[in-house]
């Protein structure tokens, strides 16, 4: 670390790893990591991190099965779901191998995994999906998916595919347009506005002398379901009332 800084605030799984590998002394506040930070070796435990990393995690893996369940509830005819994932993103790989297959079996769904490593891989994947004709689309997190959000949404709309997204963050700053606003059908996950407000708490405590090792890693307590009814109409889907009534935000 060439710069003399008092604290590092880092968003995203890979960025947290990079920061941790770069310094063992500068306090690091992780923002919205989707990994289990204990399993990932970032902290010793949630209650007592033990090193120079603390912050909050978004529980994205734990929510993956719930997203698949919500997609099935919203569009009961869905039977085959294509899953876009980046093999470099640990959370997406774990979801695909450990979480989604279990949820899919319970829901009677078939998962069609499609790996995308970089922007130039989407056309090949889209061509394959045009042949396979899935009924739904599940988009995992990671920088590749976020940066190519518009392409993914455009493909889903063109092919009338109900889509659900595991991350809210767009390719622009975090509180601008999210995937569902841009034309995705559904989002379910941690309420980022609520979670990100906690960043100031960690920064304040650390700058006043608290050690990251002693500040517990927080998990989200508020979640949100966002549904785009304009997209539903465009792709010919009617969202059941029992799903719609549970939405925290509806785009009409």
Image (cartoon, rainbow, N blue to C red):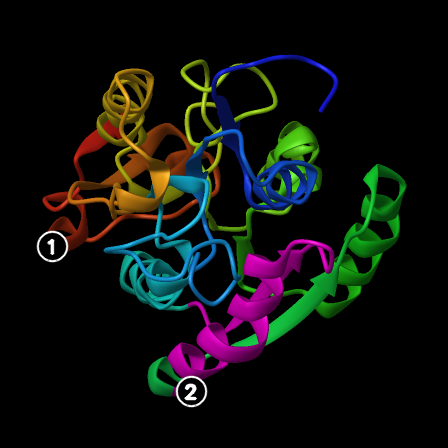
In this rendering, is residue 145 above or below 240? Answer: above
Quadrant (top left, top right, bottom left, bottom right) of the C terminus = top left
Q: CA distance from mark 1 to mark 2?
A: 23 Å
In this rendering, is residue 108 above or below 126? Answer: below
Element under disc 2? helix
Residue 199 lies in quadrant: top left
Residue 245, x across and y down, in percent: 10, 44
Residue 180, x across and y down, in percent: 42, 31
Question: Can residue 158 be seen here?
Answer: no
> Image check: 225 left or right of 19?
left
Q: Which residue is mark 1?
A: 242
How many other residues sit within 10 Å of disc 2, few (<14), some (14-19) or many (≥20)? few
In this rendering, is residue 111 above or below 21? Answer: below
> Image check: 86 left or right of 33?
right
Name the residue located 68 percent from the left edge and 13 percent from the top edge: 3
Range of residues picked out in magenta: 78-105
For the residue pair 189 and 49, the one nearer the viewer reads as 49
For the residue pair 82 and 59, the one nearer the viewer reads as 59
Quadrant (top left, top right, bottom left, bottom right) of the N terminus = top right
How many other residues sit within 10 Å of disc 1, few (<14), some (14-19) or many (≥20)? few
Q: Nearer the viewer, mark 1 or mark 2?
A: 2
Inspect the magenta stretch and tell me whether residue 124 lies in it.
no
Name the residue located 34 percent from the left edge and 64 percent from the top edge: 62
N-terminal label among 1 and 2: 2
Residue 249, x across and y down, in percent: 21, 30
Name the residue located 80 percent from the left edge and 55 percent from the top edge: 125
Which labelled disc corresponds to residue 105? 2
For the residue pair 235 and 162, the one nearer the viewer reads as 162
For the residue pair 227 and 17, the one nearer the viewer reads as 17
């Amino acid at each position: 670390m060439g710069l003399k800084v008092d604290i590092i605030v880092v968003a995203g799984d890979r960025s947290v790893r990079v920061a941790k590998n770069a310094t063992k002394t500068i306090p690091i506040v992780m923002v919205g990591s989707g990994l289990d930070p204990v399993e990932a070796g970032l902290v010793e435990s949630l209650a007592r991190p033990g090193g120079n990393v603390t912050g909050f995690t978004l529980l994205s893996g734990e929510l993956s099965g719930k997203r698949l369940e919500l997609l099935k509830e919203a569009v009961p005819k869905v039977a085959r779901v294509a899953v876009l994932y980046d093999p470099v993103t640990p959370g997406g790989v774990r979801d695909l191998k450990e979480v989604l297959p279990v949820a899919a079996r319970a829901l009677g769904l078939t998962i069609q995994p499609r790996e995308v490593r970089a922007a130039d891989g989407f056309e090949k994947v889209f061509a394959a999906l045009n042949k396979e004709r899935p009924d739904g689309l599940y988009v995992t997190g990671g920088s590749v998916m976020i940066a190519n959000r518009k392409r993914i949404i455009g493909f889903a709309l063109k092919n009338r595919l109900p889509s659900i997204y595991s991350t809210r963050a767009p390719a622009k700053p975090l509180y601008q347009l999210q995937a569902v606003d841009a034309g995705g059908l559904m989002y379910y996950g941690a309420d980022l506005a609520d979670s990100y407000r906690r960043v100031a708490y960690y920064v304040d405590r650390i700058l006043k002398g608290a050690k990251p090792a002693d500040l517990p890693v927080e998990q989200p307590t508020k979640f949100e379901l966002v549904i785009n009814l304009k997209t539903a109409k465009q792709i010919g889907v009617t969202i059941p009332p029992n799903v719609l009534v549970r939405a925290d935000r509806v785009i009409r």
